[in-house]
């Protein structure tokens, strides 16, 4: 027999019935059940016979049981509590809740309003199986609306509300009478829909909501024609966006999140910015630089990528709104040394300590940060108090909501710096270059800086794309993919490693290829934007086509640096976005360039560590 479906038979004592029905109690002591009932009546019959529960009974008769948020059955909750499935119900007495409020919601006939009554009043005061008040312990129960609640036996309370008449044994479970209904507390996912000023973010996130069938939680019925049927179909909410893009299951009750929620006005202002970052074109075509078998430079004509207007609109909608939403949630258990961030005082303290905060999507916010010389972990400099709005949050059942009227995330959050490993984003080389991957390790070497021998006290290990010259006079060049860039402005850097095989610097030129609305701009030469830039002879190269890396030097932290981060373009604006395109991208070419007279100062072999594209707000 399935104890969830069978009507319990009371034989001899209630204890034997409890075992049959799967009853739990707060202790292993005897079950204190009202002897005048003896479980002969159903939960519904017990509710209906008590005049103090008439308001609650009226609501149960008018609300149909739902299998999903959108789909209802013909069975009311009065029917459900009069059937064979086993439940525990905490029924609130007349006058303890706003009956007129719920009555008006039901009279409205609006599905969302009716479901609100079901979710917040009925399902918030019931659970599966039988649970009695006895002993001094407390148990945590999963309610029918997926919320959690404590049944405190020593105080005879349910979710903080006094149980005025406990343990009314019923043929299909247990009924308790409450002084007032258990307070409904939305989780963060539900909270989005409770405030009209959050309509914009709620509409975007909920557009990705799906309802899944929970086979394990549902009660099986008979097998008909070889197919399992279910007495009830329990479902749960899933959201592909919050799960895949945010890395957060905001609807899960046993989570512990902190979330920043921009109001409609803040959303509108920010969306005007982010939409400009995703200016796509209807057609992309990527040509690849290569060589023939004879070593002659040539081009492979790429396959055209086309988008319909509907596809372009969908891309802009998702990407521009994701840029706002992706890093809004934080898991309170993941933060620096698990220090809480559940009040604005916590946020101020984290900022004062210069902690880092990590969103559920993986973005790291720190106060402050700097541009890394090598392509390490991406960190965004942020003012925490500004981000979280300066006011204490609203507590939900699975976390805390900070509502903000101004979206004060750094621009780089939704237009992130791209740090591209040169060995991964190498596209092709010209016919003067022989490329390979070099893993260079500098193990406490002695180096000379400004004529002084320095003993380093660290182990340095870098990966490079080694651009070796095919011949003594060759000027090797290589192309690097700058994928996922936005229709935005960037400062562009290249990280060059000092070539200790030759103990010489590099002199090179840089070119960029990219799309406009109407054409492909190929191999546009970049001018040196650094006013202090000089070549090995000390001559200024500012405004010229030439770039020079420094030899081994001290970095800004006073440490010995074997790489040099060189700015090759300032405020370079891409007119077209490539975000998410994949097979189409701008390219950056690095090519050795110096005269025979300069060969004692430079080596033609270039070690490229990374391309860094630092976004800038227009």
Image: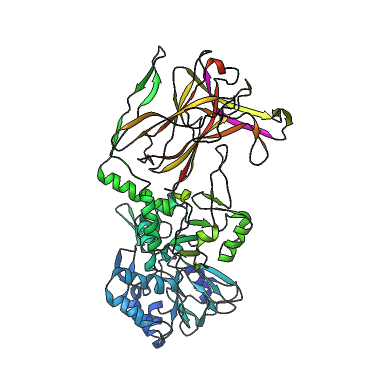
Q: Is any part of residue 236 visible from this angle?
A: no
Residue at far top of view: 294
Is residue 459 highlighted in magenta? yes
Locate residue 87: give its quadrant: bottom left
Q: Which residues are magenta?
A: 456-475
Picture residue at 35% right of the left edge, 80% below the top: 101
Q: Position of residue 557 (x, y in %)?
A: 65, 42
Q: Is any part of residue 608 visible from this angle?
A: yes
What's the colour scheme?
Answer: rainbow
Is residue 516 highlighted in magenta? no
Comparing 566 with 296, the one in front is 566
> In the image, is 212 to the left or to the right of 476?
left
Question: Vertically, is 547 above or below 74?
Answer: above
Q: Position of residue 65 (x, y in %)?
A: 34, 69
Question: Vertically, is 557 above or below 477?
Answer: below
Residue at far left of view: 309
Quadrant for the N terminus in the image: bottom left
Comparing 573 with 537, the one in front is 537
């Amino acid at each position: 027999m399935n104890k969830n479906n069978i009507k319990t038979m009371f034989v001899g004592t209630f204890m034997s019935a409890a075992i049959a029905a799967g009853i739990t109690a707060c202790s292993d002591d005897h079950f204190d059940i009202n002897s005048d009932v003896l479980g002969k009546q159903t939960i519904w019959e017990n509710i209906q016979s008590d005049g103090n529960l008439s308001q609650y009974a009226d609501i149960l008769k008018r609300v149909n049981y739902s299998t999903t948020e959108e789909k209802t059955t013909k069975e009311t909750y009065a029917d459900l509590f009069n059937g064979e499935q086993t439940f525990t119900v905490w029924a609130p007495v007349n006058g303890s809740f706003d009956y007129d409020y719920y009555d008006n919601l039901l009279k409205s006939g609006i599905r969302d309003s009716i479901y609100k009554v079901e979710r917040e009043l009925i399902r918030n005061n019931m659970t599966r199986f039988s649970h009695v008040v006895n002993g001094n312990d407390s148990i945590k129960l999963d309610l029918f609306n997926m919320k959690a609640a404590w049944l405190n036996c020593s105080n005879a309370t349910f979710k903080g509300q006094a149980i005025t008449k406990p343990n009314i044994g019923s043929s299909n479970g247990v009924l308790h009478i409450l002084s007032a209904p258990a307070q409904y507390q939305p989780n963060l996912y539900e909270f989005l829909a409770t405030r009209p000023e959050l309509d914009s973010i709620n509409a975007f996130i909920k557009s990705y909501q799906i309802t899944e069938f929970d086979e394990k939680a549902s009660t099986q019925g008979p097998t008909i024609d070889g197919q399992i049927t279910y007495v009830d179909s329990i479902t749960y909410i899933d959201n592909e966006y919050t799960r895949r893009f945010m890395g957060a299951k905001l609807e899960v009750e046993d989570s512990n999140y902190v979330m920043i929620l921009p109001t409609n006005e803040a959303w509108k202002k920010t969306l005007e910015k982010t939409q400009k970052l995703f200016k796509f074109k209807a057609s992309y075509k990527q040509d690849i630089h290569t060589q023939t078998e004879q070593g002659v430079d040539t081009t492979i004509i790429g396959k055209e990528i086309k988008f319909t207007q509907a596809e372009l609109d969908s891309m802009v909608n998702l990407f521009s709104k994701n840029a706002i939403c992706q890093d809004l949630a934080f898991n309170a258990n993941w933060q620096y040394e698990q220090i809480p961030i559940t009040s604005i005082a916590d946020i101020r303290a984290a900022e004062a300590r210069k902690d880092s905060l990590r969103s559920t999507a993986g973005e790291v916010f720190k106060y402050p940060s700097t541009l890394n010389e090598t392509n390490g972990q991406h960190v965004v400099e942020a003012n925490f108090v500004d981000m979280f709005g300066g006011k204490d949050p609203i507590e939900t059942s699975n976390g805390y909501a900070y509502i903000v009227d101004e979206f004060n995330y750094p621009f780089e959050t939704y237009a992130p710096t791209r740090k591209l490993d040169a060995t991964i984003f190498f596209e092709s080389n010209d016919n003067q270059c022989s490329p390979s991957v070099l893993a260079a390790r500098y193990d406490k070497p002695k180096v000379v800086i400004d004529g002084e021998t320095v003993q380093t006290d660290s182990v340095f290990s870098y990966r490079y794309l080694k651009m070796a010259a095919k011949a003594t006079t060759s000027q090797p060049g290589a192309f690097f993919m700058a994928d996922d860039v936005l229709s935005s402005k960037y400062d562009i850097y290249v990280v060059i490693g000092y070539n200790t095989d030759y103990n010489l610097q590099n002199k090179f030129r840089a070119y960029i290829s990219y799309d406009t609305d109407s054409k492909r701009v190929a191999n546009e030469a970049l001018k040196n934007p650094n006013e202090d830039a000089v070549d090995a002879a000390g001559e200024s190269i500012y405004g010229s086509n030439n770039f020079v890396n420094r030899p081994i030097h001290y970095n800004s932290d006073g440490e010995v640096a074997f790489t040099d981060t060189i700015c090759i373009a300032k405020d370079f604006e891409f007119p077209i976005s490539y975000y998410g395109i994949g097979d189409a991208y701008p390219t950056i070419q690095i090519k050795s360039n110096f005269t025979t007279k300069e060969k004692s100062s430079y080596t033609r072999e270039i070690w490229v560590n990374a391309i860094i594209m630092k976004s800038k707000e227009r």
